[in-house]
Image (tube, grey):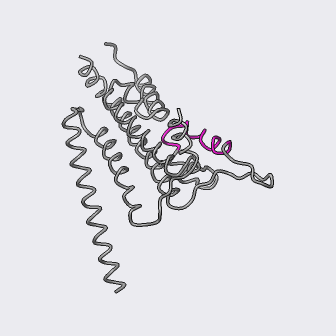
């Protein structure tokens, strides 16, 4: 009962997310959710194994390109400000 | 099977769209796309709930953040009840003044992004459900699923 009350109380007060590069990690659950919904609407017939495989592949692809974009932009900023 | 009239067909699409807006995934469920409906419901509801948990229910703010609110309300018309909950959660300060429930900083941003993206995903699901109902795919695949 206490656990449920604690969870409900969590919706009344914001979490503590510091303004640091680690906050960017919050994009990954969102990417996963977007990929799941996208694939659920896109696939003609949902076969569980194929669905999971396609979700994992797309999630990893998007994550990889976002990480590469982040590294590239950081290098660009470091180059300009150095 | 009797052929549908244009009016019946239009009404079906309208019902599917309204159901898909009221409950994420309900439009697909109505056209017998049960697996798809379950996936969409869980993913969109979880994304919205995580957004509220991160930034608190104060991230749904129709007065202070109207563009975000438009995105959030696409998740479901039930989202309109959240600002009322936030008002009820306001506390009375030491001098008797009303201290509203507020959210700010990074948690507010992340919460707003999650909840608004949940709305954008539901818009995609609504369009998908309408398209499947229009093309009759739901009925075909749905009957295959039932077998």
- The N terminus of chain B is located in which quarter? top left
Q: Quadrant of residue A81?
A: bottom left
| Nearer-the-camera pick, B68 or B56 | B56
Q: Does residue A40 appear to the left or right of B113 in the view shown?
A: left
Q: Does residue B42 appear to the left or right of B82 in the view shown?
A: left
Q: Quadrant of residue B133?
A: top left
Q: Position of residue B5 (x, y in %)?
A: 40, 21
Q: Residue at x 37, y 19 (%)?
A: B4
Q: Residue at x 46, y 43 (%)?
A: B48
| Nearer-the-camera pick, B95 or B2 | B95
Q: Quadrant of residue B104?
A: bottom right
Q: What predominant SS class does the magenta segment belong to?
A: helix
Q: Residue at x 47, y 63 (%)?
A: A18
The mark total stands at 0
Q: Residue at x 32, y 48 (%)?
A: A32
Q: Quick check: B2 above or below B65? A: above
Q: Does residue B6 appear to the left or right of A73 in the view shown?
A: right
Q: Position of residue A27 (x, y in %)?
A: 37, 55
- The C terminus of chain B is located in which quarter? top left
Q: Residue furthest front?
A: A2
Q: Residue furthest right?
A: B95
| Nearer-the-camera pick, A19 or A48 | A19
Q: Position of residue A1 (x, y in %)?
A: 53, 32
The span picked out in magenta is B73-88
Q: Position of residue A8 (x, y in %)?
A: 54, 39
The question of residue B124 being in magenta is answered with no
Q: Quick check: B21 above or below B103? A: above
Q: Residue furthest bottom?
A: A82
Q: Does residue A43 appear to the left or right of B26 in the view shown?
A: left
């Amino acid at each position: 009962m206490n656990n449920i009350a604690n969870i409900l109380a969590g919706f009344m007060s914001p979490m503590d997310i510091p303004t640091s590069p680690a906050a960017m990690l919050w994009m990954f659950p969102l990417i996963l959710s977007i990929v799941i919904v996208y694939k659920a609407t896109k696939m003609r017939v949902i076969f569980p194994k194929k669905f999971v495989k396609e979700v994992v592949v797309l999630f990893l692809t998007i994550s990889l390109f976002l990480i590469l974009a982040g590294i590239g932009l950081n290098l660009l900023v470091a180059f300009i400000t150095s | 099977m009797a052929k549908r009239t244009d009016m019946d067909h239009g009404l079906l699409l309208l019902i599917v769209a309204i159901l898909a807006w009221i409950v994420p995934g309900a439009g697909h469920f109505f056209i017998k796309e049960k697996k798809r409906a379950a996936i969409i419901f869980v993913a969109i509801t979880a994304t919205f709930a995580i957004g509220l948990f991160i930034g608190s229910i104060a991230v749904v703010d129709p007065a202070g953040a109207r563009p975000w609110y438009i995105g959030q309300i696409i998740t479901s018309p039930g989202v309109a009840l959240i600002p009322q909950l936030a008002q009820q959660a306001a506390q009375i300060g030491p001098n008797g003044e009303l201290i509203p429930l507020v959210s700010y900083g990074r948690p507010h941003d992340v919460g707003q992004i999650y909840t608004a993206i949940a709305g954008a995903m539901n818009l995609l699901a609504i369009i998908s459900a309408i398209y499947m109902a229009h093309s009759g795919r739901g009925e075909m695949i749905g009957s295959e699923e039932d077998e």
